[in-house]
Amino acid sequence: MPSSLPQLPHNVLAPLQWQSATWEDYLAYRDRPTDQRMRLYFNGQALLVDMGSEGIDHASTSDLFLLLIYVWVNHHQPNLAVGSFGRCLLEKLGYRAASPDLVLYLGDSIPRREAGDLRRIDLNVWPVPDLVGEIADTSLASDLDEKKKLYADLQIPEYWVIDVQGNRVLAFRLQPEGVYCQLIQSVTLPGLSIHLLEQALERLGEEPNFAVANWFGQQIQ
């Protein structure tokens, strides 16, 4: 690491390792010029720097779930405005930041970037997303622990963890007391069965994601 960066623990870039850090440490990574793919998560005094390219399973699953959401909305709520911002940095200045695989805004409050604006979603300006999700290929423990707490602290209404290796979709709804409760049916996308999403995920092991999305569309007719 360049010497100008804060002296974080030597293994701060170890895969999926959260480290003690300050907001200034987070900013140093956020604003560091680099051509490497980097996703950042910060909550309170903990920082995760996720570097490296997506694997084939992660990428295929991420694209599949965007297709499934599109098919569902197009069939059930075709007039609903939907904005997708997967992996875009969400930032609550001074406190929290995250780069979820899935970021979904519904309705009238979809972020729009004007010339000169930051290239991230400022949660002091825009509301939080209606739904975020993480594709858990190698990150399941963190997605169900530190990231789950981070999204609850950000007051994200609905959070999905897509367990690639286990063919599971773990969906959670934020409760008034600030904790997540597991769902069997989405609230953000009313009527969408989590079990049906799991069936689609399982088929992805045998079929390309566009074929799975076509099957999914047939199931919801």
Image (cartoon, helix red, strand yellow):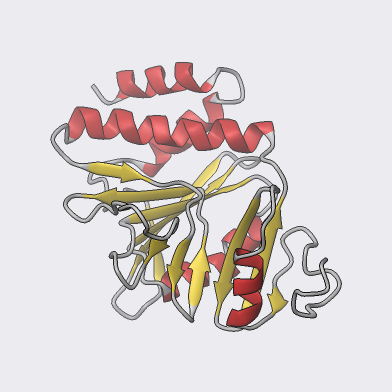
All told, the count of numbered labels is 0
Q: Residue furthest front?
A: 116
Whole-percent x, y for residue 184 in the image: 36, 50
Q: Residue furthest right?
A: 10
Residue depicted at 82% across the width and 77% down the height: 9
Is 11 left or right of 92, judged from the image as shown? right
Camera-side residue of 15 and 122: 122
Residue 211 in sight here: yes
Whole-percent x, y for residue 164 in the image: 61, 40
* As drawn, 3 above or below 34: below
* As drawn, 177 above or below 35: below
Residue 145 in sight here: no
Is 32 left or right of 130, judged from the image as shown? right
* As drawn, 49 above or below 5: above
Is 10 left or right of 138, judged from the image as shown? right
Camera-side residue of 218 and 105: 105
Camera-side residue of 6 and 211: 6
Which quadrant of the figure has residue 24?
bottom right
Whole-percent x, y for residue 4 in the image: 77, 75
Which quadrant of the figure has residue 77?
top left
Camera-side residue of 209 and 95: 95
Residue depicted at 13% across the width and 35% down the height: 79
In which quadrant of the rendered image does the C terminus lie?
top left
Which quadrant of the figure has residue 219?
top left
Whole-percent x, y for residue 104 in the image: 35, 49
In which quadrant of the rendered image does the N terminus lie?
bottom right
